[in-house]
Amino acid sequence: MAAEREPPPLGDVKPTDFEELEDGEDLFTSTVSTLESSPSSPEPASLPAEDISANSNGSKPVEVMLDDDREDLFAEATEEVSLDSPEREPIVSSEPSPAVTPVTPTALIAPRIESKSISAPVIFDRSREEIEEEANGDIFDIEIGVSDPEKVGDGMNAYMAYRVTTKTSLSMFSKSEFSVKRRFSDFLGLHSKLASKYLHVGYIVPPAPEKSIVGMTKVKVGKEDSSSTEFVEKRRAALERYLQRTVKHPTLLQDPDLRQFLESSELPRAVNTQALSGAGILRMVNKAADAVNKMTIKMNESDAWFEEKQQQFENLDQQLRKLHASVEALVCHRKELSANTAAFAKSAAMLGNSEDHTALSRALSQLAEVEEKIDQLHQEQAFADFYMFSELLSDYIRLIAAVKGVFDHRMKCWQKWEDAQITLLKKRETEAKMMVANKPDKIQQAKNEIREEIEEWEAKVQQGERDFEQISKTIRKEVGRFEKERVKDFKSVIIKYLESLVQTQQQLIKYWEAFLPEAKAIA
Amino acid sequence: MTKEEFTKMKQELEAEYLAIFKKTVAMHEVFLCRVAAHPILRKDLNFHVFLEYNQDLSVRGKNKKEKLEDFFKNMVKSADGVIVSGVKDVDDFFEHERTFLLEYHNRVKDASAKSDRMTRSHKSAADDYNRIGSSLYALGTQDSTDICKFFLKVSELFDKTRKIEARVSADEDLKLSDLLKYYLRESQAAKDLLYRRSRALVDYENANKALDKARAKNKDVLQAETSQQLCCQKFERISESAKQELIDFKTRRVAAFRKNLVELAELELKHAKGNLQLLQNCLAVLNGDT
């Protein structure tokens, strides 16, 4: 379909157009006229009008080539390297290197290395920008890391601050490497800003990690036990994945809010994200209203593609949930296995001590040592199970919820269009009635009024139709991109997970091979 | 249930049955070999009948009365054991053995329990693999993108891995847990032997005292003498055989541990290598595809 080949809105190529764009929340409720009236920051928002008009002049020849390249780039990771300029090679080769490092439970940073290598697929997505930049000689990449969780403050007002480090060579950022301190509510604030701007236009905005009252309270209270450190590590990894997913999206990457989040050292506190604030309660009310609306809207689906896709996503959601439950059970059992192995190791050591035959006693203590090492191995494997497999699944379950949300927005958009059409019809009927009634004295004024109203509603209907088409087009593109991302993500993570299993088996072999001669030596 | 699920379940049940069968067979074998190796027990008529009679033995289980008798006997024995254990032994060997056995028994009990728990969690982890495999299979068959082949391959891998993991857990159970359980009971039996000897010793000492009293009073001396002599003989006989038995116990224990630990290590190695091979093959195929 022709719409699919249209690239996402261009970045910094057309400075003149930015004046016409509006940086507001109500992008679509306002009519076209208000767009021209307010100048604002250079936000390349996903305005349909701008898209079609701006992109149609400008870099048309480049775009044609870009489209081809984009399709190719998404298909094969290996092919990507050959298409690129030689400058890109070192980045590609260095990124995947920290991939297969075993996760050690002591160094909590270790799982971060695993998730950092997920950033390797990040490079493949910035196709368009990158090829544009190639013309300018820039190397395009952006790497985000979230690290160093620190507790700030005391008591119930304490919070964890995370360091967000960005390494990039994009020209839209002022520096090539910078880091800022952010807290969890800042991330939530960023997400709510992006969602309010892009969700109802049809873009799939990655969801932020969830709040957890229990976890945070433990941290605040200052319990320095393993469960609170685990909680912080889990959150840190989730925040990193969230940011990486967000910057992977070419449209979201251009957003100034995102840039402000990554760059500016002081960020206004996002109070609206608190559950008990006014905005929080408003959110809950809205959610309830939405749920009711969803049940009452009956949409005439003219496009079978949408129905099919919705069904697919439903199925996928169910399957992923089931798989996630099984993987969580595996993590739990593996942790249990690790604990039991440790207990057994101690018991075997004691048994070895009380055994008075020297060779047997030595063998038993060796057995105890082997089992202790195996217990460490199981613990590491449990970490890998969790951080790679289980978290991937839960991320995708939330992403699919966001996708469903986008479909719902499309339905709402259609509803608005329908309503506009119905109102227009009513107004026309009223006009027709007035024409027939023929009361000359007050008729002229009323006729003018109704004429105005009809014109207003005609415009609204047209706008509604345009909005609906745009959102449908955007959704198609987004879903295509999402599917490609999903395939890539799953493949790379599962392969890494299997590699971790391979490592575990190799270690097991080493340990048992060392023990065997000891056992044979019992005389 | 679909046909695949049915065949899978059937395979699972067969594997479990096989594992339990192997376990029971091994236990019986150890028991019979032990009896056969013992110089005195091997001559027992019951044992010969057991080995040779080629028709159904029709062994009757204990009925309620006998079970109750056993229960009371046990209670009396443990009460008596407490009294008797207070007596200090003349023989160093037996004193040492007693302390050793007490400690060893407790530790073996602990190790046996922990080993059981370990093999059980190993088994539940293997079961999880099974569920993950089926979920991946469902994902693979429903998905429309090219990832479906990928999922199907990984699901297959999980199925095979699971079989290996289940076997690992079964083997650990067989070689380690069963060994420890057996020696738990053996050390209990050895403790019982020591108790019987101490009982004989106490009887002997009592008989001595009775004899002295009789000699002092000059009444029933002959009777006291004969009973004392009987006790003495009994005690000496039991001491002798107990010594032999305990030394045998040690040798047997060392040999059994050696055999089982070596077999455990070999089996773990075999399974880990098999697992590794499986995983590496699968990875090669997956990497080749993508």
Image (cartoon, rainbow, N blue to C red):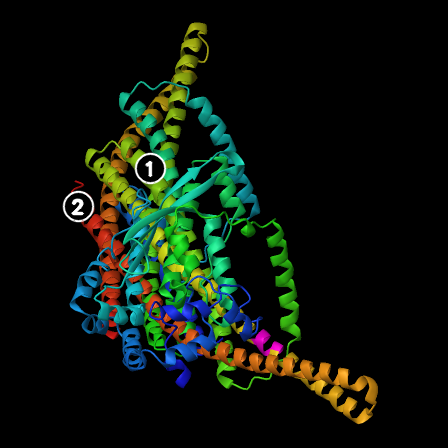
Q: Which residues are magenta?
A: A411-416
Residue B175 appears in the picture as rendered: no
Mark 1 belongs to chain:
A
Residue pointed to by mark 1: A346
Figure check: A115 above or below B156? above
Mark whose residue sits in front, 1 or 2: 1
Residue at mark 1 to residue at mark 2: CA–CA distance? 22 Å
Residue at the extreme top: B216
Q: Nearer the viewer, residue B136 or B266?
A: B136
CA neighbours of label 2 inside 10 A, class few (<14), some (14 to 19), many (20+): some
Q: Main secondary structure of the magenta part?
A: helix
* Disc on res. A520: 2
Please name the amino acid that badge 1 sits on.
Lys
**In the rendered view, does B262 fall on the left or right side of A238?**
left
Residue A412 included in the magenta stretch of the image: yes
Residue lying at 55% horizontally and 70% vertically, measured from the top left? A34
